[in-house]
Image (cartoon, helix red, strand yellow):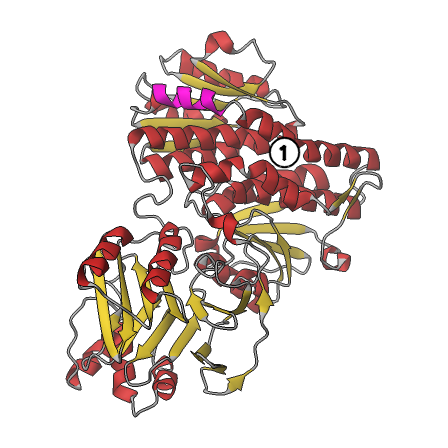
Amino acid sequence: MCGIIGYIGPRNTIKVLIEGLKRLEYRGYDSAGIAVMHKGEIKRVRVKGKICDLENLINEQLILGDYGIGHTRWATHGEPSENNAHPHIDCKGEIIVVHNGIIENYSFLKNTLIKDGHIFVSETDTEVIPHLIEHYYEGNLLDAVKKTVKLLKGDFTFIAISKNELDQFIGVKNGPPLILGINDKEKIISSDLAPILNFTKDVYHLENGEICYFSPDKIEFYDFEGNRIKKEKTVVNWSPHMIEKRGFKHFMLKEIFEQPHALRETIIGKTSLDEGKIDFDVEPSFFKNIENVHFIACGTSFHAGLVGKYFFEEICEVPSEVDYASEFRYRNFLVEKNSLFVFISQSGETADTLASLREVKRKGGRTLGIINVPESAIARESDATLYTQAGPEIGVASTKAFTTQLGILFLLALFLAKQRGRIKTSKLKKYISELHIIPHKMEKFLNKSKDIEELANRYYTYQNFLYLGRWVNYPISLEGALKLKEISYIHAEGYPAGEMKHGPIALIDEQTPTVAIAMRDRVYSKILNNISEVWTRGGKVIAVIDEDNNEIVKEVTNVIRIPKTEEILTPFLTTIPLQLFAYYIALRRGTDVDQPRNLAKSVTVE
């Protein structure tokens, strides 16, 4: 959630920190700050509000820095304010800390430190960290941090510097991510790859319970017991241009239009049409004897899991269940011998999903991650990992990550069907062939995006929407409603259309438009009945339909036509107009599309 960054090197430190914080904006924040060392003195600037406000204040005060740290904050303990913004400092003004996470025992620690004479000036849990380091400091920052982390409970990641030990940084990870990027002349540490990519592709990913010490000419890693450990450097294959808007007004719009390319990259090399074969970089024996599958995820990834359930039960006849990770982790769930637990996460750092993974592993379950970010926690801790190739997704409202997750789930369903002998080679080849055509059909639809913009202009003033879908497009109704809620702040409900008579039909009136996904599939006649129920009660209906469907036009207010495909594959296409519809409505309403209020891209704390 919060974003942290630290830099030391020959470049302009202030510029590096500000640009780095801007690349972390998409994570969500309500305040920001930096602290830099200049000629042996600490200069700290914090604001409630946007990074541009921070930048203006720094320029007004003519702040200079030799190296430093920065932070974007979402309020947890203490309201959004300059006083609660990071970085936080100790009583003597010598130790500076930026922190991501929650210190669960901060109240006890704070009261203990106050009795010891420490003076606190904020309402945050973070402030106990610099005071604890101060308490233990005897001339060695690293030693003081080693003693401090043993007292902290909860999920916490932080960076600390001291005016008494120039050019030295301490990074600690016990929950949210922390990545150190290096090149010959500089080092940059951050909670995200985005600020690092312009500097280097050589990185170290810290694991939970690890401490990183670095200076201009040294890097050392320790565990929380103080033991030296060895870490392997990894090379990131993302490029800096992936995190630029490249002419688009918003990252979200760019990422919607990147979906054809992202899906191609995800499925390429994994399929052989000639042989009717699916290949993953996972030992095939890993998937042997699977008798049931559990999909575990949050938010949009949960909706991908719901679609995956239909894929698996339809294609490979494997019983499947889908759980919200935030609920699953607290259930007394059973781990059966031949179960596969699939954890879906764009970031690979989602706190509830990661906690669920660890609980499944503790019980001896077989775990598979479907992840977009290499070297993320879920990717590293899963027994096996399948990667989507969406590239960096900056917009908070997930788009291309969702469709690439569908791509992996569909391929996995085909793979298991082949392995279990539940699909004929001719049918397998047909599915593979159609999947490879889907990106082209996405592009065909995206070329008509102006039609969706015009439609959004007619509906942007409405305050309530109902989204209806059945069978494999029921999850897409949920996803469409979520997109509208996330970025336009319009109340929207996604519902299985067959359940409408059990409550939601009471919402229908001329002020509550309904978006109905009405593809010509096995439940087409049923969704027509549901549309009729809305229409006869005076409700406006926007129908997402096959491009050659003319019979429904007289019974709805507006139609969105999408290219035809196999009925099981329609979610790849039906989701795109709903993404665009939400985007253009939010654009017309003037909301912050890429950084919607109260939301974070990666929910890395519970």
Q: Nearer the viewer, residue 75 or 302?
A: 75
Residue 474 rendering spot, x and y as whole percentages: 52, 32
Q: Residue at x 45, y 67 (%)?
A: 178
Q: In the rendered image, is residue 103 in sight?
A: no
Circle 1 residue: 439
- Amino acid of disc 1: Pro
Q: Nearer the viewer, residue 394 or 432?
A: 394
The magenta span reads 449-458
The answer to whether 290 is drawn above or below residue 465 in the figure is below
Taking 53 as reference, is 443 left or right? Answer: right
Residue 578 rendering spot, x and y as whole percentages: 47, 30
Residue 422 falls within the magenta-colored stretch: no
| Outermost residue, bottom side | 138
Q: Residue at x 41, y 75 (%)?
A: 172
Residue 453 falls within the magenta-colored stretch: yes
- Assign a secondary structure to mark 1: helix
The answer to whether 196 is drawn above or below residue 309 in the figure is below
Main SS category, magenta section? helix
Q: Quadrant of residue 542?
A: top left
Q: Quadrant of the C terminus?
A: bottom left
Q: Sort mark 1 into few (<14), some (14-19) or many (20+) by Cα contacts within 10 Å.
A: many
Q: Quadrant of the N terminus?
A: bottom left
